[in-house]
Image (cartoon, grey):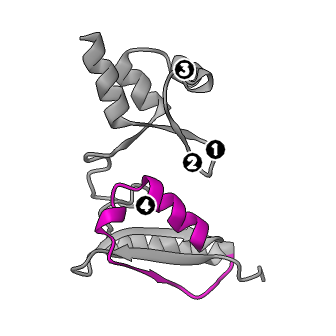
Amino acid sequence: MSAATHLVYTAYDAEGDPLYVGMTSNLDGRLCTHRAQAPWWGDAAYIAASEPMSREESLRAERERIHTLRPKHNKQHNVGRNRFPGRELLTTGEAAKALRVHPQTIRRWIASGQLPAICLPSGVWRVRRSVVNGLVGDAA
């Protein structure tokens, strides 16, 4: 059996509606990332967390909670929700499409500092919608 190193957490708004479900091995670090980047963070009134469990158990529990609660801001495993309503952070591919350039161009701009972006803990890059909208407006 795997060590109990992970937990599943749920962010709720003041009315008790679920905003987001996630799983992590570092709750403080993950909440710090949400505080800095998640568009729902300002609406979060409280966070509920499970007891520690194995990574495999937490992955199953996370998926099950997302299917059951259908939190507003989860994308993965959340069948039936509009996936990207007003999302603040765009993938490099989405930014490239909006700017009508190749995704590699976006990555080069990020690497050179020409395009401000956020590196997520997973190592992938995201670009703020407002930055892309500003560039689209400049090109028009």
Amino acid carrying label 2: it is Leu
Q: Quadrant of residue 41?
A: bottom left
Q: Which residue is mark 3?
A: 109
- In the rendered image, the residue lying farthest to the top is 140
Labels 2 & 3 near each other (Cβ < 8 A): no
Q: Secondary structure at mark 4?
A: loop
Labels 2 & 1 near each other (Cβ < 8 A): yes
Left or right: where 125 falls relative to 18? right
Disc 2 or 3, which lies upstream in sequence?
3
Labels 4 & 3 near each other (Cβ < 8 A): no
The Cα atoms of the two marked residues, 4 and 1, are separated by 21 Å
How many residues crowd around disc 2 within 10 Å: few (fewer than 14), some, or many (20 or more)? few
- In the rendered image, the residue lying farthest to the bottom is 51
In this rendering, which labeled residue sits more in front, label 2 or label 4?
2
Q: Which residue is mark 1?
A: 123
Q: Which residue is mark 4?
A: 77
The Cα atoms of the two marked residues, 2 and 3, are separated by 17 Å
Q: What segment carries the magenta color?
A: 28-54
